[in-house]
Structure formats: structure tokens, C-alpha cells
Amino acid sequence: MLRIIRRYLEAGSMADGVVVARSEGTPQGGPLSPLLANVLLDDVDKELERRGHRFVRYADDCNVYVRSQRAGERVLAALRRKYAELRLRINEEKSTVARATHRKLVGYSFWVAPGGVVKRRVAAKALEEMKQRVRQITSRNGGRSMEQVTGELARYLRGWKEYFKLAETPGTFAALDGWIHRRLRALQLKQWKRGRTTFRELRARGLPEWLSVKGAAHGRRWWWAAALGAMQTALPGSYFDRLGVPRLAAVTATH
């Protein structure tokens, strides 16, 4: 086993089709990195357990939960010493003592509900990364059909929804659903382009003439028009349900 690990570490890595030598560490995302992390950090887990601390560790990412700033400083100092014994370096830029609601772990964070109940949420950075990905998929400059866009979007959202199913923020998920549907309505308006086409499509979906005229008079302000009642009536959430776009608001945590 040690020979296999050594050969893996000395093998180098591939970058743009070229083999690049490595002087230290393992390739990010490789299967060896979490294995070695668990082997090396087992001593850290046992030390934290011996001290009676509550903690969560995923590979080399670890959060320890204590009751005060002073206790946190003591634990961080102890971890620095323990890591030094293992010939490991702590990333000082990412390591600090702070409130649990201000920190994240594998994309999750915490929030305090009424009554002082601590619940899980999607960390702000993970939420922004998700929205950025949705913006890319629903870009109005892609030249793709609505079916192609919603197909790719559905695949991404299903995976994201499954990963963050433990988050206890139905209001946040409902707001995301509304934002995603508005982006899709804006995309549909861009594809219809002209007001005459939009009027015809809205009438075909059963809207009265006066409301269709209002919905069609957007002057290419697609994002603005996507929030109008005409578009929400013509393209309701159920329309995107039929296209296979999953709703995030259905994500709830159980105890």
C-alpha cells in the first residue's frame, strides 16, 4: 500500500495535456487526498474527542464548536500544536475563531430561528455560486431553445437540491424559485423578440387582449417585463414544472 501511495505521489499531474512534476501535496480532487487526510487527521479527531469538544471534519476542513471566544482561541492554539506534531500547516487565512453563524462547512452554515433554535442554511458563498451558474445556463445570448435550457437547468438543480436538502430555509428556496422562473420568462421574451410575436403568444395562452397588449409593450426590457402579471399568468410556475424544472422550495429538513 505504501508503495502504491508513493508511486501516486511521484507520478506528477496532467495540465492541458502536459505532465507536470509535483514537489509536494496531492492533486486537488483526487481520490488519494481525502484518504491521506483521514489517516493523518485521525489523531486530531481523537484529541478533540478526548477534550470533549463538538466538532465536524470533512477531509481537511474542520469546525470545532465551543461556548466562548476565549475557549475558541485555546482550541485553535492546541490545534496548531497538534498539526505541527503531524508536520502539517494550518491555512491561517482560512482559520479563525468566529461565531458559528459566520462560518461555513462544505457549503452549509447556520442561522438562529425564533426561540433561539439553531438551524442549517446554505452558506452565502455557495448560494452566490449557485446563482452564478443559473445565470450562465439561462443566459439570453446562448441561442438555445427553451427545452435545451430547461433540460440543462433541471439537471443542475436536481443535483444542487439533493446536496442541500438538509437546509432549513423554505423562504430562501421559495425566493430562488421565483427568481429562476423570472429568468426563464425573460429568456422566453428574448426568444419572442418582437412585441407582435409576444402579443400573439400571450393571446394563444388565453390572456385577454388588454393584458396581452400590456405584456407585449416591453420594448425589449425583458427582465422588467418578466415580472409583469401578464407574463406570470401566461408562464406560471406550473409551466416550468411541466418542462421538468424542479422546485427548490420543496426542500425541507426532517428530524
Image (cartoon, helix red, strand yellow):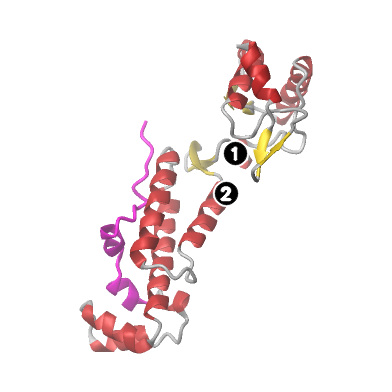
In front of the other: 35 or 172: 35
User: Mark 2 Cα within 10 Å, few/some/many (few <14, many 20+)?
Assistant: some
Residue 253's quadrant in the figure?
top left
Q: Amino acid at mark 1?
A: Lys
Measured along the vertical axis of the image, is residue 79 above or below residue 115? above
Is 81 left or right of 153, judged from the image as shown?
right
Is 107 left or right of 209, judged from the image as shown?
right
In front of the other: 27 or 106: 27
Q: Are marks 2 and 1 in contact (CB under 8 Å)?
A: yes
Magenta span covers which residues? 228-255
Instruction: Check disc 2 and report its element: helix, strand or loop.
Output: helix
Residue 60's quadrant in the figure?
top right
Report, in whole angstroms, how far the alpha carbon at label 2 lies from the one at label 1.
9 Å
Measured along the vertical axis of the image, is residue 167 above or below residue 12? below
Q: Amino acid at mark 2?
A: Ala
Is 31 left or right of 14, judged from the image as shown?
left
Instruction: Check disc 1 and report its element: helix, strand or loop.
Output: loop
Query: Which residue in the structure is indicated by mark 2?
Result: 124
In front of the other: 165 or 37: 37
Residue drawn where x is 34% and y is 47% of the image: 250
Circle number at residue 104: 1
